[in-house]
């Protein structure tokens, strides 16, 4: 009977646990659905206030490419030579763009039309960024959950769904590469951490595929292929090497590099440029360390010392040989194998000295302190607490998050545009900090409720009200009852083997005698802390909604002004492009400053001399010389370029 009672207790406990897990899973899924809806809907202010229109300059080029892709197909896209830009030079589009964004939007358009949902290409382009902002929020949940659990993951996902820094590049109509690249960045980091925690080759393969999607989407993929090697090297130096680390990194370098080389705009740069060399060096170091650990398991300590000397000697010689080869490869380059954009990040003064056209762009300027407050608001005060939480305790996943934050803080300090890379790290660490704070405060309120005589602590335990810490044992009254029943059964059995079997009957899966020290605060302080955090979150939400509605939802192509008689809308840009499209010949050439090149080709469908790609500084200088010259000199330059119309933008 005792055995049956113990078994029924165990089954009841197991059934209750499964029900509780099922309910918590349903609540978590529902919360994630609401977070996705929030991330999507908060970016629709521009559509509500104006109309479904594409913003800025670069998105119009992406829209034009997506139009061509959806009309002509993938093979024509790869071989597309565009003769309407950079006249008379032209541009090979398929080999000079990161195709991830256009392929993604084109695939969405194709799927919708296959399902008889007849949306235009422009509409799909407008809503691509809000859709992928929801995906980025879910990826943030997955990444944070791997490090600090479900609660921190939900908090981080909610924060990222609203963070102004990310909203600035993902509102409806902001059809730029970052729309899908930030999702690819976070998802790649999640798969790396997941592989690091599980050692699964399946997740390692998915990680390489996600990295390939990031390479297709944005030139910022070099941040991934340098950050992950830094973390691997950190794990090796701090003595945290494991087979899981090898599985997480080695397939990424091999398979990821091969896949990256398939992208035409990257090609052999995946193995020939300095941005990728750190990953190869760490790859060699990882194999040397793996070989050392393997030999250590085979040999005696004395033979291991001899083998260590040999392995380190050969490994050092191999590393020096690789370094010599890499040095020889980059010695012939004046930039030592680095691209101009990478050098402008490593040396903040480089662009102003050698590439002034890059330094002239506003989003390439260093940020000011108000820029940080505008971009991340109160999260800046929560990040230090999140860093401390990552060290309690420190794991491979939490150390990666700290390293991600530190590196992204530096790069955001060099270029204001890269606050977009900082935003996920700030949101993750702030979510961890808020989750831990709410956990401590609500737990303190829970342990200070009135308790009955049956659950009074023993003489050795400290009461919650008398000390800031309390020792809470995981053994409960039910566990004591089970022990008494097991003792009764053991007296009826004579053999040692049968006693061991009866001890297993009805035993709790939680290990008894395990003590956990929990921080317990006074109830008044806990209530005030919860109220303060709720107010802080409320201020953050107000700021995010204001930023989404006012600061980042006004398309630059539609101008507005307010006066005493209300709101005035000036649609001069679109009217001028429509005039060019309807009143000029198809082969007419239009000269303008490079800022307006993409819009002229996309909206007026006319040939331009320069555009926003800025790949030929000489051509841009020629147009600049014409625009700053007297009429006679400008006439001669424009005649040599076969220009018929000059687009001049001025204000009054």
Image (cartoon, rainbow, N blue to C red):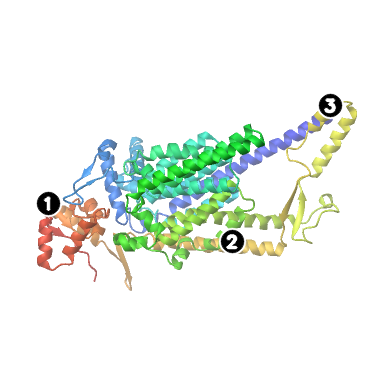
Residue 131 visible at all: no
Residue 648 picture quarter: bottom left
The residue where tag 2 is placed is 534
Mark 3 vs 2, N-terminal side: 3
Which residue does the image show at 38% across and 54% down from the upper left?
Answer: 342
Judge by depth and name the residue closer to the eye, 628 or 608.
Answer: 628
Q: Give the label on residue 498, or none.
A: 3
Between disc 3 and disc 1, the foreground one is 3
Residue 432 picture quarter: bottom right
Which residue does the image show at 59% across and 61% down from the upper left?
Answer: 534
Q: Is 493 left, or right, of 438 in this rendering?
A: right
* Helix, strand or loop for disc 2: helix
Question: If the image is split into quadrants, where does the C terminus sit?
Answer: bottom left
Cα distance in 3D space between marks 3 and 2: 56 Å
Question: If the image is split into quadrants, where does the N terminus sit?
Answer: top right
Report crowding for label 3: few under 14, some 14 to 19, many 20 or more residues within 10 A (C-alpha).
few
The residue where tag 1 is placed is 585
Residue 91 visible at all: yes
Residue 298: x and y in percent read 63, 31
Mark 3 vs 1, N-terminal side: 3
Mark 2 vs 1, N-terminal side: 2
Cα distance in 3D space between marks 2 and 1: 61 Å
Residue 307: x and y in percent read 59, 36
Residue 484 picture quarter: top right
Residue 145: x and y in percent read 57, 46
Residue 72: x and y in percent read 25, 38
């Amino acid at each position: 009977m005792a055995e049956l009672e113990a078994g029924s207790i165990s089954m009841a406990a197991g059934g209750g646990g499964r029900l509780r897990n099922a309910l918590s899973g349903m609540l978590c899924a529902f919360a994630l659905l609401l977070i996705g809806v929030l991330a999507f809907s908060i970016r629709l202010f521009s559509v509500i206030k104006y109309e479904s229109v594409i913003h800025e300059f670069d998105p119009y080029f992406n829209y034009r490419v997506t139009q061509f892709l959806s009309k002509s197909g993938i093979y024509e896209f790869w071989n597309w030579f565009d003769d309407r830009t950079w006249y008379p030079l032209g541009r090979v589009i398929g080999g000079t763009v990161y195709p991830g964004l256009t392929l993604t939007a084109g695939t969405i358009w194709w799927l919708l039309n296959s399902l008889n949902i007849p949306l235009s290409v422009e509409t799909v382009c407008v809503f691509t960024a809000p859709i992928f902002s929801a995906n980025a929020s879910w990826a943030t949940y997955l990444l944070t959950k791997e490090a600090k659990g479900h609660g921190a993951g939900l908090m981080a996902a909610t924060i990222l769904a609203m963070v102004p820094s990310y909203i600035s590049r993902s509102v409806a109509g902001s059809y730029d590469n970052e729309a899908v690249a930030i999702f690819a960045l976070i998802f790649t980091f999640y798969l790396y951490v997941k592989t690091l925690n599980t050692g699964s080759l399946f997740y390692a393969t998915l990680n390489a595929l996600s990295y390939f999607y990031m390479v297709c989407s944005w030139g910022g993929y070099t941040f991934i292929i340098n950050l992950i090697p830094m973390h691997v090297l950190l794990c090796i130096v701090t003595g945290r090497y494991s087979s899981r680390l090898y599985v997480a990194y080695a397939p990424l370098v091999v398979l990821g590099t091969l896949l990256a080389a398939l992208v035409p705009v990257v090609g052999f740069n995946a193995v020939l440029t300095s941005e990728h060399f750190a990953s190869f060096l760490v790859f060699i170091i990882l194999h040397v360390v793996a070989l050392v650990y393997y030999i250590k398991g085979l040999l005696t300590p004395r033979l291991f010392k001899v083998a260590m000397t040999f392995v380190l000697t050969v490994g050092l010689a191999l590393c020096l040989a690789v370094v010599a080869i890499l040095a020889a490869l980059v010695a012939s380059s004046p930039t030592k194998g680095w691209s101009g954009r990478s050098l402008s990040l490593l040396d903040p003064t480089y662009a102003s000295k050698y590439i002034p056209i890059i330094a002239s762009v506003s989003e390439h300027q260093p940020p000011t302190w108000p820029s940080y407050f505008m971009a991340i608001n109160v999260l800046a005060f929560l990040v230090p607490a999140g860093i401390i939480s990552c060290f309690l305790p420190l794991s491979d996943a939490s150390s990666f998050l700290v390293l991600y934050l530190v590196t992204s803080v530096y790069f955001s300090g060099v270029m204001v545009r890269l606050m977009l890379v900082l935003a996920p790290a700030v949101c993750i660490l702030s979510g961890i900090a808020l989750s831990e704070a709410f956990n401590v405060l609500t737990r303190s309120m829970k342990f200070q409720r009135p308790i009955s005589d049956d659950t009074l602590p023993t003489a050795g335990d400290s009461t919650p009200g008398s000390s800031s810490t309390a020792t809470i044992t995981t053994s409960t009254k039910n566990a004591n009852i089970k022990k008494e029943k097991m003792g009764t059964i053991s007296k009826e059995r004579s053999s040692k083997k049968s006693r061991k079997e009866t001890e297993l009957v009805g035993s709790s899966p939680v290990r008894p005698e395990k003590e956990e020290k929990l921080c317990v605060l006074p109830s008044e302080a806990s209530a005030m802390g919860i109220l303060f955090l709720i107010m802080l979150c409320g201020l953050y939400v107000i700021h995010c909604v204001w930023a989404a509605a006012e600061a980042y939802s006004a398309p630059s192509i539609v101008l507005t002004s307010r006066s005493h008689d209300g709101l005035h809308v000036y649609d001069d840009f679109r009217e001028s492009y429509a005039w060019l499209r309807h009143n000029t010949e198809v082969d007419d050439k239009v000269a303008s400053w490079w800022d307006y090149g993409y819009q002229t080709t996309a909206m007026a469908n006319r040939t331009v001399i320069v555009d926003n790609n800025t790949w030929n500084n000489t051509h841009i200088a020629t147009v600049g010389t014409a625009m700053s010259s007297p009429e006679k000199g400008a006439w001669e330059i424009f005649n040599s370029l076969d220009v018929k119309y000059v687009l001049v933008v001025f204000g009054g």
